[in-house]
Image (spheres, grey):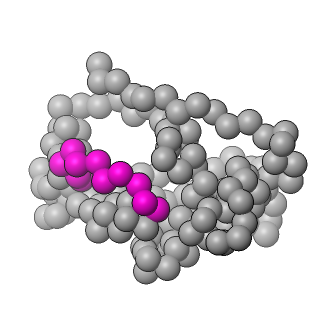
Amino acid sequence: MGNRKFYGPGKQYEIDSTHPFTVVTQFLMHDNTDEGELVEIRRLYKQDDRVVGNPASTWPALNGTDSVTESMCNTSKAYFNDHPYVMGGLAQLGKEMVGGMTLAMSIWVDSGANMTWLDSYSSKDQQNVPLAFGAATVPTPVATRTVCSPRVPTRL
């Protein structure tokens, strides 16, 4: 989070979004088995013949975190003034995954911060810069950008 040099269009980025790449998500258990308690979610990126680890967060409160852990979730919720949803955390997610899941992804389900962590400036980033979606990476005027409405997932 906050690392603006990792992903984007062009060779100046670690992952060049103008070329195909694969995202690998690892679900790590406390005892390194398939049966243990989920304690970490880690990402790797493969582009061409390179495998690149998830970059460390540049947000000061996250102390260089590069994966999803219970501590990272709690710290980021507090840092961004987001509601701390209490649903059992990673341990509960791991239990739910045992029964089987279908991955459904949406990068626009962030009604609290409207995805400003992804490619914009936020009040945590620069105190005097107004929230502007895509301001950090999208070279279009703010007035011409659209923001998707968040969708609330339902359990099937």
- Up/down of 156 relative to 38, above or below: above
Quarter where residue 6 is shown: bottom right
Query: Where 58 falls versus 4 (above or below)?
Result: below
- State the image coordinates of residue 69 (x, y, percent, origin top left): 31, 63
> Of all residues shown, which one is farthest toward the top?
156
Does the image show residue 102?
yes
Task: Give the left or right position of residue 145, taking residue 108 as reference.
Answer: right
Placement of the C terminus among the 4 image quadrants: top left
- Please state the horizontal and vertical placement of residue 116, each as a whole percent of the image: 61, 54
Q: Is residue 155 left or right of residue 59?
A: left
- Please tell me which residue is depicted at 56% across the width and 39% down the height of the picture: 108
In this rendering, does residue 68 appear at all?
A: no
Asked whether residue 88 is drawn in magenta, I would say: yes
The spot of residue 4 in percent (x, y) is 67, 67
Q: Residue at x 34, y 24 (%)?
A: 154
Q: Position of residue 141 (x, y in %)?
A: 87, 48
Above or below for 14 versus 97: below
Q: Main secondary structure of the magenta part?
A: loop
Q: How many callouts does the rendering have?
A: 0
Residue at 13% over, 64% down = 31
Q: Is residue 72 left or right of residue 86?
A: right
For residue 140: magenta? no
Identify the magenta region: 80-90
Q: Nearer the viewer, residue 155 or 25?
A: 155
- Residue occupying the point 27% across, 62% down: 70
